[in-house]
Amino acid sequence: MPSSDKKQSNEEDFESVRTILAGDSSAFANIQNKYKSKIAALIRRMIKNPDDVEDLTQETFIKAYKALPKFQFGYSFSAWIYRIASNNCIDFLRKKRFQIISIDQPIGNPEDENYFEIEDNSYIPDIDVLSNEKKKIINDAIEELPENYKKIIELRHKGEMEYKEISIKLDLPLGTVKAHLFRARKILLEALKNNAHILRDDF
């Protein structure tokens, strides 16, 4: 992308962020429309399961929205949101103990604007000690969800069921399953934010 186009793209992103921070959350749709396919493509390089790719794409935008007040203008917004996406994938891979890629290898082409190396922070002290506490915090938050959201979250994250399997089991349209998951995660993220130092972005 020519430098003039990159600058214009960044200015568009900055304007969207300013609008959101000023109270107009609908402007976040501009960011989602602009970056959804790019974020999904980045995640797809690291994660093979299509449902997991969609989950992680959704979660990236939820986390980006919550982190917008911390965004530093003057830096590339695209690099910032790609970093959120990659860290989200690393957390997912770490929890699942997948060996799809080496997480200390660069992502992307060196000439691409979204090229960067991922730092391996895989060592987390006292993880076993925190495990039961984390589970209790998350389970308590799930119990507070509306019943229709709670069931879908349990099937997806505890039962590890695919979207289509959940759709069939609950006799719901696939689009409804995806929408309910997205809304449920937003509610959970808000409910769990006070315990972020313990949970390390489990949702």
Image (cartoon, rainbow, N blue to C red):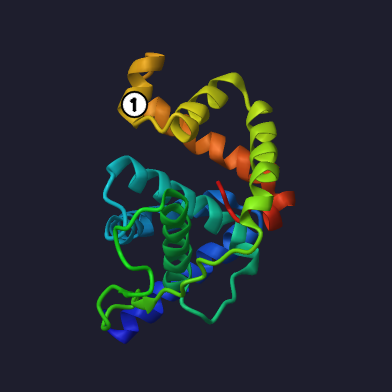
Q: Is residue 164 above or below residue 76?
A: above
Q: Nearer the viewer, residue 177 or 202?
A: 202
Element type at marker 1? helix
Q: Nearer the viewer, residue 176 or 159?
A: 159
Task: Specify the amino acid type for callout 1.
Answer: Leu
Compared across the picture, whether 187 is left or right of 7 comes to right
Question: Seen from this angle, which residue lies furthest right?
Answer: 194
Residue at left offset 58%, top offset 61%: 19
Which residue is under mark 1? Answer: 174
Compared across the picture, whether 90 is left or right of 168 comes to right
Query: Residue 37 appears in which quarter of the rendering?
Result: bottom left
Question: Seen from this angle, which residue lies furthest bottom?
Answer: 3
Give residue 14's position: percent from left, percent from top: 52, 70
Q: Count the marks.
A: 1
Give residue 40's position: percent from left, percent from top: 32, 54
Residue at left offset 74%, top offset 50%: 194
Give residue 188's position: percent from left, percent from top: 62, 39
Query: Residue 142 appears in which quarter of the rendering?
Result: top right
Q: Is residue 130 above or below residue 78?
A: above
Residue at left offset 70%, top offset 40%: 137
Residue at left offset 35%, top offset 21%: 167
